[in-house]
Image: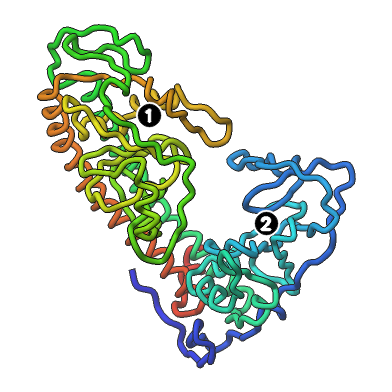
Amino acid sequence: MSFPKYPAYKDSEVEWIGEIPVGWNLLNGRRLFADKKISAQSGDEQLSATQKYGVIPQKDFMKNEDQKVTLAISGIDNFRHVDEGDFVISLRSFQGGIEYSYYKGCVSPAYTVLCRKNKINDIFWSYLFKSRLFIDEINASSEGIRDGKTIRYEQFGKIAFAIPPLPEQQAIASFLDRECGKIDALIAEQERLIALLAEKRQAVISHAVTKGLNPNAPMKDSGIPWIGMVPEGWEILSLNKVVRNFVDYRGVTPNKVESGIPLITASCIKHGRIDHSIDPVFITEKEYNRRMTRGFPRVGDVILTTEAPLGEVAIIEDALISPGQRMILFKLDENMSSFYMRAYYLSDIGRQELRSRASGSTASGIRADRLRASAIPVPPLNEQKEICAYIDRKTSAFESLEQQIRYELNLLKERRAALISTAVTGKIDVRAQSKAIAA
């Protein structure tokens, strides 16, 4: 759907804004918002911290049941007071724009609090502060720190904004609420389809690796509640019966360099594959030879993460890699298929088996001895291969459909972002539409 432009424009002389409608003004951030530096006084009121808004009163916080209290905090003399309607900047995490505060309370020194100097439309400014154009502009003006960038009021205050009259702010806010609401509904539907495909994929894998392909096969009790009944010709074995060598890389801290032999960190193992581009770090050949004294990976070996996260699995496709910390390499017995083992640990059943033997309150991990003792249902080798071929056939159709859905999902998100950016910078005129809706 196309939208009309304003009758006349003028050059803003601001690169990220471009032309603006005649009648709009230009003001920098410090003319619009003040940096709130008042210390919070908590009195006897209980305070809790959130990752998103810092610290807010418990009684106000619990109005939003979808969010979680993550930390109790005391000693807040240097914290900044937040009123409902203020905007909050996280100094060191700025990928999602500036947050609007729905609460009263306070935030830590890791946040900047912006309070308005004049009457504004909160919804319009919420959209503007979340627009990709604005986020790119403030990131470009931010200061570098060791682990990224820091956003301070000084940087925000220098940024120029195109300001429509208040009625137009209200019209743009209403327009974006309406149009973004339509797009959000479509996005939610696509995300539901992706979740449904994931459930179907899991069901196919879990059923195949525990029940086999013959619906008429005689069954027996595995003795493990989450595995349940298995075909009579299968065995329930511990891993140490089907893995001839466990190579444990945990506890060895690698020295990372900018180029060399790929170091595979735990975050690189996703969806049954190794993707080094997720965390492209390397080690030297000397470091590689020192680390690999425990055992060199070979094509066809299976690698499993043992914590943070637990249970991600992949098959080695390129032997010239160095497994990082928190992972164990399996060199399998000749009667065990690496593809079947990967399928088992990709299933809910296999991951439940790992979780049942894991320990740790915050980040679950599994000890090597408990991993060796963990159970796996083992069909005859020829049946393992048949099961893997079946899983590949069934899930390839799901993967193709998911790729198409994700493509459409990305288009919707791009359309939403583009609509917000064009509306808040005056590239489209939505006043007539808002009047028509109101009428």
Farthest-out residue, right = 43
Q: Position of residue 357 (x, y in %)?
A: 45, 23
Would you identify the image quadrant in which residue 63 lies?
top right
- Camera-side residue: 323 or 131? 323
The image quadrant where one finds the N terminus is: bottom left
SS state under label 2 = loop
The residue indicated by pointer 1 is 351
Horizontal and vertical percent position of residue 37: 81, 66
Q: In this image, 36 relative to 67: left or right?
A: right
* Three-letter code, disc 2: Ser
- Along the line of sight, the residue nearer the viewer: 60 or 256: 256
Find disc 2 in the rendering and name its residue: 101
Q: Residues within 10 Å of mark 1 (few under 14, many from 20)?
A: some
Q: In the displayed structure, does residue 425 sit left or right of residue 240? A: right
42 vs 213, left or right, is right
Q: How is the image coloured?
A: rainbow
Residue 250: where, in percent of width, then height? 45, 40
Q: Is residue 183 visible?
A: yes
* Numbered marks: total: 2
**Vertical relation: 90 (above or below) 206:** below
Q: Residue at x 40, y 78 (%)?
A: 4
* Eye-nearest disc, 1 or 2: 1
Give the distance between the C-alpha atoms of the residues marked 1 and 2, in whole angstroms: 39 Å
Q: Secondary structure at mark 1?
A: helix
Mark 1 or mark 2: whose residue is earlier in sequence: 2
